[in-house]
Image (cartoon, rainbow, N blue to C red):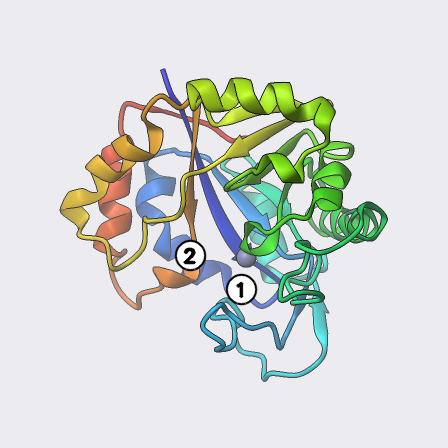
């Protein structure tokens, strides 16, 4: 039986928790746990793939500053208060495009490790809990970044894993995973979870959500469903796609990845 994981990316110090809670009300009301991938020290000038300012930045003018998540921030308080249903992950450090247009896609192991350690300590101080999973911004990881992540975290969630990004000692695990398309493999003492893209967005026809979930999870031991709350922000009722997702997951095994 496939285990499903809900992963939401990009919460940060500027995120209004009330909007996030409204967007995901159907999932939270159904009792599902959500892994919230949180940016520890968000850059206020980070750009989306389309060149526009990232849409997860709220109520702060663009600048070269960063905003570090602190214990006093509303979103920190909300995560702490929902510790039974919201499980945080480290989402980069600043989500800035520091090299080759990504944050972790072109860093050495030492460079990546330093950013991961800093990000983790910021989150753990703000959220008052251990944070033992990592998600790279835009799922972009260099070989050194993968090495740094698997030597530090219990779980790494990412998309495509290429053999060229892995040390030769990890190739057998990679080949075994590809044979079965299980989407999960053990590297060091870290469980690496692959996902098959993020098609669950506001432009998806709600009537296709169930079939999409079936396609994403076919043969998979673990199916990570990647969501972005800021795509589903509405001023009134929750988005039809989120409601359809809650219905499609009813009766399935949904758990936190860590
Ligand atoms: Zn992100």
| Residue under numbered circle 1 | 15
| Residue under numbered circle 2 | 229
Disc 1 crowd, CA 10 A, few/some/many (<14, 14-19, 20+): many
* Badge 1 element: loop
Q: Residue at x 45, y 37 (%)?
A: 195
Q: Are marks 1 and 2 in contact (CB under 8 Å)?
A: yes
* In the image: residue 251, left or right of residue 198: left
Please tell me which residue lies in front, 117 or 193: 193
Disc 2 crowd, CA 10 A, few/some/many (<14, 14-19, 20+): many
Question: Where residue 36 sits: x, y (%)?
Answer: 53, 46
Q: Residue at x 46, y 35 (%)?
A: 33
Question: Where residue 211 sits: x, y (%)?
Answer: 20, 36
Question: Where residue 242 sits: x, y (%)?
Answer: 29, 49
Question: Where residue 83 sits: x, y (%)?
Answer: 57, 38
Q: How many marks?
A: 2
Quarter of the image that includes the C terminus: top right
Please tell me which residue lies in front, 18 or 40: 40
Give the Cα distance between marks 1 and 2. 10 Å
Please tell me which residue lies in front, 129 or 151: 151
Q: Quadrant of residue 219?
A: top left
* Badge 2 element: helix
- Residue 50 vs 156, above or below: the answer is below
Q: Residue at x 37, y 62 (%)?
A: 231
- Residue 220 vs 56, above or below: the answer is above
Q: Quadrant of residue 228?
A: bottom left
Q: Is ligand 1 within 8 Å of the beta carbon of the residue shown at mark 1? A: no
């Amino acid at each position: 039986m496939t285990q499903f994981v809900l992963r939401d990316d990009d919460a940060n110090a500027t995120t209004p928790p009330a909007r996030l809670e409204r967007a995901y009300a159907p999932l939270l009301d159904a009792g599902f746990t959500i892994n919230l991938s949180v940016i520890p020290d968000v850059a206020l000038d980070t750009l989306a793939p389309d060149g526009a300012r990232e849409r997860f930045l709220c109520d702060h003018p663009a600048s070269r500053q960063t905003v570090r998540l602190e214990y006093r921030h509303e979103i920190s308080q909300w995560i702490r208060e929902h510790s039974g249903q919201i499980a945080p992950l480290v989402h980069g450090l600043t989500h800035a495009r520091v090299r080759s247009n990504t944050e972790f896609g072109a860093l050495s192991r030492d460079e990546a490790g330093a950013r991961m350690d800093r990000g983790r300590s910021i989150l753990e101080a703000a959220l008052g809990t251990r944070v033992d999973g990592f998600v790279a911004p835009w799922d972009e990881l260099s070989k050194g970044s993968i090495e740094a992540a698997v030597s530090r975290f219990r779980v790494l969630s990412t998309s495509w894993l290429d053999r060229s990004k892995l040390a030769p000692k990890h190739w057998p695990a990679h080949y075994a995973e590809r044979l079965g398309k299980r989407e999960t493999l053990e590297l060091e003492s870290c469980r690496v979870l692959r996902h098959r893209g993020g098609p669950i967005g506001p432009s998806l026809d709600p009537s296709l959500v169930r079939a999409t979930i079936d396609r994403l999870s076919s043969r998979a031991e673990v199916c990570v469903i990647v969501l972005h709350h800021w795509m589903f922000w509405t001023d009134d009722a929750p988005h039809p796609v989120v409601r359809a997702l809650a219905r499609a997951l009813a009766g399935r095994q949904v758990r936190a990845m860590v």
